[in-house]
Image (cartoon, rainbow, N blue to C red):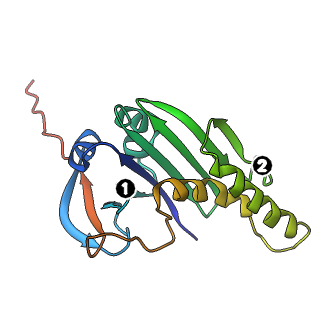
Amino acid sequence: MGFRLSWIAIKGTPPDIALDSLSLERTGTRESTPESQIACASLPNGWFLIVVNDHIPSITGPDSAAAISVGCRAVVCHVNETTMDSSAAGYEDGGQTWSVIHNPEQDPTNVDICGRPPESLNNILERLNAAQNATAGDDTKTAPLFEAPVDLANDIVGFRYDADVESEDDPPFEVLRLKRRPRKWRFW
């Protein structure tokens, strides 16, 4: 069993405003790796990162990403090492501008590309296709194209789910939680 997580990175909106718009709040607890259900980190390049172990659509889903990207940029990445599928998407000013998806059940040698992803994707795909061709006919269960969305998101944001994070904070991640909604009492 491997990683199964999603993350969203936002640039151009203050972190506390981003958290509030996603109905998240800080707990004050810090950790060196994002092991809690939800954690955040400020990256040195100006991106604000929220990592969700598993997937919570209200945080990393397309509607949330589009809404939070109004007036700024957002990148979302989903990783599932159990099924070896991955995806990344870019959002700007309230809309999705590109997406890159690798779904090995659909086609292990294919990456679906929509919109206009950053040009660095060309070099990433060239490198990964060479690795894919080098392992063709191998009995090993490798899936180099799984890395395409992950590497592209890392290239833009500077975060890779399976690598250490550079941050001014030590430890770099702060645990988050969903805001509790006030209870509405009903009397019949």
Residue, x 68% and y 40% (percent of image)?
Answer: 113
Q: Nearer the viewer, residue 14 or 120?
A: 120
**In the image, residue 137 lies at what x, y percent?**
92, 68
> In this view, which residue lies farthest toward the top?
188
Quarter of the image that includes the C terminus: top left
**In the image, residue 78 lies at what x, y percent?**
53, 52
In the rendered image, is residue 152 in sight?
yes
Q: In the rendered image of this protein, does residue 40 appear above or below residue 184?
A: below
Chain-order first, disc 2 or disc 1 = 1
Quarter of the image that includes the N terminus: bottom right
Name which residue type carries label 1: Leu
**In the image, residue 100 lies at what x, y percent?**
63, 45
Q: Is residue 20 left or right of residue 1?
A: left
Q: In the rendered image of this protein, does residue 5 appear above or below residue 166?
A: above
Q: Which callout, 2 or 1, points to the residue nearer the camera? A: 1
For label 1, the crowd category at 10 Å Cα-Cα, with few meaning under 14, some 14 to 19 and many 20 or more, is: many
Residue 140 sits in which quadrant?
A: bottom right
Disc 2: which residue: 110
Residue, x 34% and y 32% (percent of image)?
Answer: 71
Name which residue type carries label 2: Asn
Residue, x 51% and y 70% (percent of image)?
Answer: 162
SS label for mark 1: strand
